[in-house]
Image (cartoon, rainbow, N blue to C red):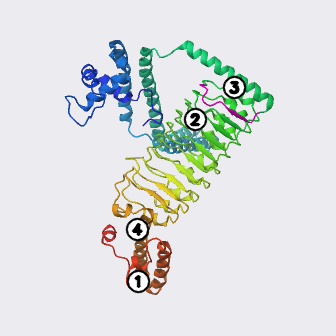
Amino acid sequence: MEPNPSKFPLLSYVLTRINSNLPLLGRVSSSVSSSPEVDVEQHHGYTQEDYRDHQLFEEMPHLRNPDVLAAMKTAVADVAQTRSILRTLGERPDHETVDSARQTCAEIDARLAKQLEEIVLASRPEGVDRFEWRNQLAEKERQCRSDAEKEKSVYKAVAQLEEMHDAYEKLLKDAEERLIKIYRSSEGVLNTEGDRSVEEEVNEEVVGILQEAMGKGIERVDLSGRQLTILPEAFGRLRALVVLNLANNQLEDLPDSIAGLENLEEFRVSSNALLSLPDSIGLLINLKILDVSGNKLSALPDSISRCRSLVELDASYNKLTYLPTNIGYELVNLQKLSVHLNKLRSLPTSMCEMRSLRYLDAHFNELHVLPHAIGKLTNLETLNLSSNFSDLKELPDTIGDLINLKELDLSNNQIHALPVTFGRLDNLVKLNLAENPLVIPPEDIVKNGAEAVKVYMAKIWLNILVEEERRSMLEANQESSETGWLTRSTSWLNSFVTGVSGTVSEYLGAGGKSFKDPYLDQQL
């Protein structure tokens, strides 16, 4: 999924149809054009593929030109070949695993260097021939190197797989961009003289703002929507600047000189064409709000972790495949993190150290799993994990430790069962579980809302605790303590369901007997 819609939304279909020489274009253009609104579910002498060919023809009319088609076909072959190789490589390792593998390799190398140093400095024992001693040292060195290489082999394989994925994805990107450029050149869409005049006007305006800001020590500069393609290095000298808005421009990069904006607290550069952020952004130690959404970022620099004053970070609508491994260890003041509509496959373990985090939106990604320690985010109030589709299949038990969670969206995933600890989310008031193949809790419970789900899961949790305690008592032969434990458990459940679904007696039954539910008994 592409966070930023392409100018050519049918690019993927272009690849398929050009490979098959677009045999239907001529026929479809005449048969479909007379009927602008077509129901592709019905049969009118053409198929759904015919209709999509018609869409393609409408979007990209220059495909009629055989020369354009021939030129694009060559580029398509490169795209198809690169995609095939990527599929052959298999699943790409997550960023944290790669970082860990590289660090382990470095540690093994450091240990090897120390061992080799000890070998070189070792004294020759008396009575041992010098030549024989050298042979012994050479053998020890060979053995140490062999052991180190054997130990590193697995970790090196992980790093090499990541490098291969990275290299081929860059080739794929280049090939796809070449395909688009070929078509654009046939359109003649570039009006260089017009572009030049607009750019000159913008540059004059920027220069004027710069001169005024330097003379008066202006704290706020708004250059949003000005068609900027370049941000002058001189911006780094506006040391009094507190707010800088560069949203809705055409910037592809930012100058390293932004590190000079030592008082900057709010930096908005959304809806541009940024491919990366400069490492110098980590020097903005007073930055509180950073909005880089709606760009083409495939990664955030590791240095962003040094922006320790950050309270809000919005990196949504990009192409992020990972977040910096150590981002959570230093951004301890972050309260709002938006990373939706990216290509994240996992969240770094360090994120669980963001104890100030109140809002986390990671919907529309490719998340496979959540960090096990996510329960440490005890101040989290809103969590959106929806639309990770076939990738997200389960939640860690520690999600029950999010004691302040109020809103949780898990819709459009592949979750079959909620963790048994789910009933401990006392403050949860808004819950979306739509479009999941849920078995626990069943659909008739889910449709009754968050409170019904919490009570249901709490009863499961209590039944498990009762069974564990029963087994423990049998093993330890301590029947006398059973009554006291059950009293505590019943008290907890009673306080939980009060004001929600009646008293605990409704769930445990008359006389304090254990709760019996045929469905739960079957599951347990």
User: Magenta residues, as a range?
Assistant: 218-227
Q: Which residue is mark 4?
A: 456
Q: Secondary structure at mark 3?
A: helix
Nearer to us: label 3 or label 4: 4
Q: Is the Cβ of the residue at disc 3 closer than 8 Å to that at disc 2?
A: no
474 lies above or below 238: below
Q: Is the Cβ of the residue at disc 3 closer than 8 Å to that at disc 4?
A: no
Nearer to us: label 1 or label 2: 2
Q: CA distance from mark 3 to mark 4?
A: 60 Å
| Residue 226 shown in magenta | yes
Residue 127, visible in the rendered structure: no
Q: Please state, as top left, top right, bottom left or bottom right, where the C terminus lies in the image.
A: bottom left
Disc assigned to residue 445: none
Disc assigned to residue 270: 2
Q: Earlier in the sequence, mark 2 or mark 4?
A: 2
Residue type at mark 1: give it.
Answer: Gly
Q: Which residue is mark 1?
A: 512
Q: CA distance from mark 1 to mark 4?
A: 18 Å
Q: Secondary structure at mark 2?
A: loop
